[in-house]
Image: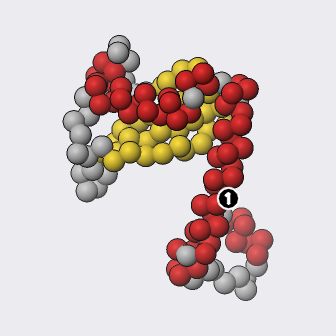
């Protein structure tokens, strides 16, 4: 980022907060949708790995992040707010199964999680 700003020169004016949270953000969302769609096209050709990890934010919300890796490229797929659920093996198994269905069962080669006891138990379902 610093290199890019340096290339622009000393007269560079950063976008305002309004532009960053409005039109520029919307454009980035659209660009990422296109990139994700390109990424999806390779899933059936190469197979993919689903990666998941859970964490708790500063507000004590439990979040589950899902990423898809294929052909040396990894993309964030989605995050699930699991705060209202008990993060046990049954819930994790259901959440992972939902992502597998979204990606396409025939496209998934493996699922990678952390080694927390609830994830290990979910793998036995």
- Outermost residue, top direction? 124
Colouring used for the render: secondary structure
Does residue 23 lie above or below 106 as drawn? below
Q: Which residue corresponds to the image point at 72% horizontal and 44% vertical from the top-left? A: 38
Quadrant where the C terminus sits is top left
Residue 92 picture location, percent across and down: 33, 30
Position of residue 44 in the picture relative to residue 85 (left or right): right
Q: How far from the left and from the top, in percent, is residue 36?
A: 64, 46
Q: Residue at x 67, y 45 (%)?
A: 37
Quadrant hosting residue 105: top right
Residue 120 at least partly seen: no
Image check: 18 left or right of 9?
A: left
Task: Look at the numbered disc 1 and give the secondary structure of its residue.
Answer: helix
- Which residue matches tag 1? 31
Give the quarter of the image for residue 118.
top left
For this view, does 61 lie left or right of residue 15?
left
Q: Residue at x 47, y 34 (%)?
A: 99
Vertical side of 45 occupied by 14: above or below? below
* In this picture, residue 98 sits left or right of residue 62: right
> How far across and how far down the image is residue 66, in percent?
47, 39
Q: Residue at x 67, y 31 (%)?
A: 43
Q: Nearer the viewer, residue 8 or 50?
A: 50
Q: Answer yes or no: is residue 65 visible.
A: yes
When the figure is inspected, residue 72 is found, relative to residue 47, above or below; the finding is below
């Amino acid at each position: 980022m610093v290199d890019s700003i340096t290339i622009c020169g000393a007269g560079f004016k950063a976008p305002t907060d309004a532009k960053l949270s409005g039109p520029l953000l919307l454009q980035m969302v659209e660009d990422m949708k296109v990139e994700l769609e390109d990424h999806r096209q390779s899933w059936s050709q190469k197979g993919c790995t689903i990666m998941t990890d859970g964490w708790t934010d500063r507000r004590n919300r439990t979040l589950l992040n899902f990423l898809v890796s294929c052909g040396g490229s990894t993309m964030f797929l989605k995050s699930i707010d699991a705060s209202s659920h008990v993060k046990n093996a049954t819930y994790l198994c259901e959440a992972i199964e939902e992502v597998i269905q979204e990606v396409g069962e025939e496209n998934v080669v493996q699922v990678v999680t952390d080694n927390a006891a609830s994830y290990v138990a979910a793998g036995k379902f």
